Amino acid sequence: MVTTVREVLATVTDPELPVLTLEDLGVLREVSVDGDEVTVTVTPTYSGCPAMDEIRADITAALAQHGYRATVRTVLSPAWTTDWMSEDGKRKLREFGIAPPGPVLLQIGRRVSCPQCGSADTEEMARFSSTSCKAMWRCRSCREPFERFKEH
């Protein structure tokens, strides 16, 4: 069975959120193939994302296992947005216990559902969490802390 470049890339996970593939996250922008030479263009979630070296290495290693030589290009424009995240990726985050990004309602502030119990009675505890793209929240109903993937 021949494995396509897209099939290989669909298996590469985010090093900071291994529950998500790079495809789920929406950072894969373009893929071009010329024989066994592959150019993959990615847009990081943040311009200074510390995971980019690992992402490049993971893409290169995954493609090399299937006989491809990869060049990974990083582009910052247009800037990545959570709108590029797949619905499947948002579902995976929720199932993993991280509140996915959602709309910001200006009239009543952020409405964030607890990924543990589903309550909307939540509060932000810290703007930054284990990674720059997440914030620390707490549910007032079940009293459990949780991370929330920030929208941008």
Image: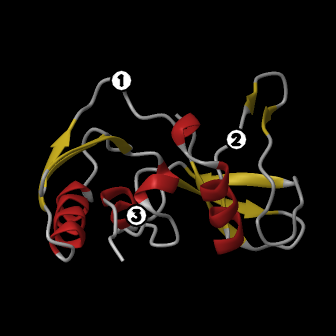
Which of the two marks, 1 or 2, is nearer to us in this view?
1
Q: In this view, does 147 lie above or below 30?
A: below
Question: Which image quadrant: the N terminus?
Answer: bottom left
Of badges 1 and 3, the one in the foreground is 3
Q: Name the foreground residue: 65 vs 77.
A: 65
Q: Is mark 1 on a helix, strand or loop?
A: loop
Residue 4 % position (x, y): 34, 62
Q: From mark 1 to mark 3, how far is it between C-alphas?
A: 25 Å
User: Which residue has dot 1 on it?
Assistant: 78
Give the CA separation, mark 1 to mark 2. 20 Å
Q: Which amino acid does label 2 sit on?
A: Gly
The amino acid type, in three-letter code, at marker 3 is Glu
Q: Mark 2 points at which residue?
A: 102
User: At x 52% / y 55%, what residue is drawn?
Assistant: 24
- Left or right of residue 64: residue 93: right
The residue at the point 86 percent across, 73 percent down is: 142
Query: Which marked residue is nearer to the observer: mark 2 or mark 3?
Result: 3
Which residue: 24% across, 63% down? 59
User: Which residue is found at the position 63% from the left and 63% from the top?
Assistant: 93
| Location of mark 3 (residue) | 7
Q: In which quarter of the image is residue 147?
A: bottom right
Task: Tell me residue 74's x, y (percent).
Answer: 20, 40
